[in-house]
Amino acid sequence: MRSKGFNAYTKYTILQHALKGNNVSQTCELFGISRTTFYNWKNAYEKHGMAGLENRERRKPKMPNKVSKDIEQEILSYVTKYPADGPKRIYYELISQGFDIGETGIYNVLKRYNLTRKAQRIEYSMDEKSHINIKKRDKKDMSIFSNAKDSYPGYLVIQRIDFIGTFEGIGRIYQYSFYDTVSRWGEVKIYNKKQDIDIWHYFERKLIYLLETFSLNIENLVTEKEREFLPYFVKGNKYKEILEDFNINHIFISPEYIDILDGMREFNEFLMMEFYNKIPLNDKLDSFVKVEAAINDFIRKYNFHSIIPNGPKAGKTPAEVVLERAIENGADLDTLPLWLLALINYSK
């Protein structure tokens, strides 16, 4: 008798038979099941009771490697433009553009067209360019952000990654920055190893905490897409979970063509001039750990003490603008952390 033909009650009876006789092997032989099957049932019962013994309908497997003609053309178009990139890089780029495809599916397309090697892709690219006009993808309609500066905190937030530089005695510094275009609130996380960059862990641990503290939400999140750092924004499924859980509209854009990125650029230029360029002049900043503590303190002072020089929020600090929005959203000041209230009061 095949094990998948047993219902939950029969499985339970078999488990009890083995326990009473204290002989699993004999029970398995008697009922024609393997020891692996027996212990799978046993573990399922211990975790979920009788529900764990119910037969589950097998879902049809997803076919992430099956590629439609449209996506196949996107892959070939990408190869034409960037022949040096292999399947992994193509995967990251297409994911950032909203295509649902696996890396293996991309490799299969390349294999089908004999494009798995770099030399083959370069040759293909040269041939294609001689007789095909590459259709440029229409730039995303960013008109919805045209009045972002007159909106409210959380309406439009920008994030990016930069390589800041290599510092003597400290090593390399990579920076992830997060900037709200209305309040000009900024957050920074630095890393000294590229492989340690984990954007969405920091987003979940730090930024979501701030959102909940201020009773805010992010409506639109723009990721400034640099080819070097793109994998750190799309690797794994955590970013999709966070975006879905918090109902965030996420958009990747290239950095060269849109002015809504100006605020973020000014923020990063400010950090470079007022913090990073001064590291060699400060003997106390002789390790990455000390630099990390110093940038955290610098950002805290920026958010709570710097005055917005122009625009509808001129004369206020980023923290004051965010706090005003929190109050509008019904946040109870009595529930705010004491450290936050102290900083807000001190900044006034």
Image (cartoon, grey):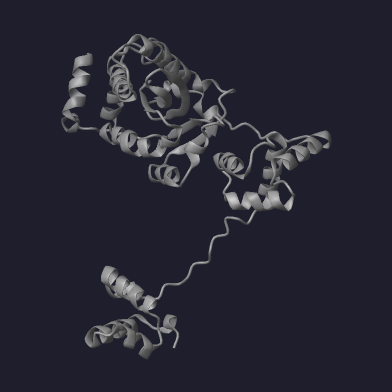
Q: Quadrant of residue 240?
A: top left
Residue at the far bottom in the pictured view: 30
> Can I make out residue 215 in this image?
yes
* 170 displayed left or right of 58: left
* 85 displayed left or right of 10: right
The spot of residue 100 in percent (x, y) is: 57, 49
Q: Quadrant of residue 36?
A: bottom left
The spot of residue 222 in percent (x, y) is: 48, 31
The spot of residue 287 in percent (x, y) is: 32, 22
The spot of residue 314 in percent (x, y) is: 36, 12
Query: Which residue occupies the foreground of this view, 122 or 207?
Result: 122
Query: Which residue occupies the foreground of this view, 329 or 163?
Result: 163
Please tell me whether residue 197 is drawn above or below residue 24 in the rendered image.
above
Q: Quadrant of residue 118?
A: top right
Which residue shows up at 29% across the image and 32% down it?
210
Residue at the far right in the pictured view: 131
Q: Quadrant of the N terminus?
A: bottom left
* 308 displayed left or right of 105: left
Query: Which residue occupies the foreground of this view, 287 or 130?
Result: 287
Please tell me whether residue 247 is drawn above or below residue 315 in the rendered image.
below
> Can I make out residue 132 in this image?
no
Residue at the far front in the pictured view: 169
